[in-house]
Amino acid sequence: MESSILFNGSHGHDDPDYLAWLDANPEGFVANIPHPHTPYDNFPVVLHRASCPHARNPGNGGKLTSNTQWKVCDLSLDTVKRGALRYTRVALKYCQSNRTGGCGRFWTAEGNTR
Ligand SMILES: [Zn+2]
């Protein structure tokens, strides 16, 4: 069964593992999700392409993956979206960054490929 990869700060799924996955899968996708039991659980979940510079923005405490911030990754956007919905019910949002390599040139706010 296909399944997304969850980086949650645990051994083998920590920041270096996440960064290695981004480097190995530049055509993949990432959902940046808060832990379900934090006060952040009403923040929008932002979807990025693995090549987006914002996929490498550290969160609270300078960590990319931790007890409070998880990354759901896969080469399939649909799998990432389904994976994110296993952990959170908040709306998914498509990153609109116009930085070099940012997602804004790839898809619209509705997720349609440009
Ligand atoms: Zn992005």
Image (cartoon, rainbow, N blue to C red):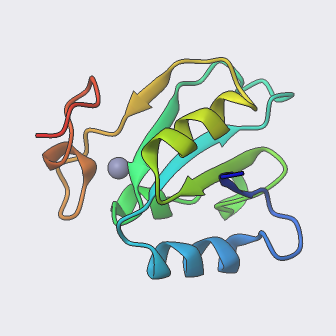
Is 2 above or below relative to 22? above
Q: Could you say which quadrant of the image residue 41 lies in?
A: top right
Is 45 above or below relative to 52? above
Which residue is at a point 55% across and 44% down the rendered structure image? 80
Numbered-mark total: 0
x and y percent of residue 89 in the render? 67, 18
Which residue is at a point 64% across and 61% down the rendered structure image? 64
Quadrant location of the C terminus in the rendered image: top left
x and y percent of residue 48 in the render? 40, 49
Is 89 above or below relative to 30? above
Which residue is at a point 63% across and 71% down the rendered structure image? 18
x and y percent of residue 85 in the render? 66, 28
Is 95 above or below relative to 8? above
Depth order, front residue of 109/98? 109
Q: Residue furthest front?
A: 1
Which residue is at a point 44% across and 41% down the rendered structure image? 47
Q: Is residue 3 left or right of residue 95?
A: right
x and y percent of residue 49 in the render? 37, 55
Q: Is residue 56 left or right of residue 17?
A: left
Depth order, front residue of 63/46? 46
Q: Is residue 53 left or right of residue 59?
A: left
Q: Could you say which quadrant of the image residue 108 lies in?
A: top left
Q: Is residue 82 left or right of residue 77?
A: right
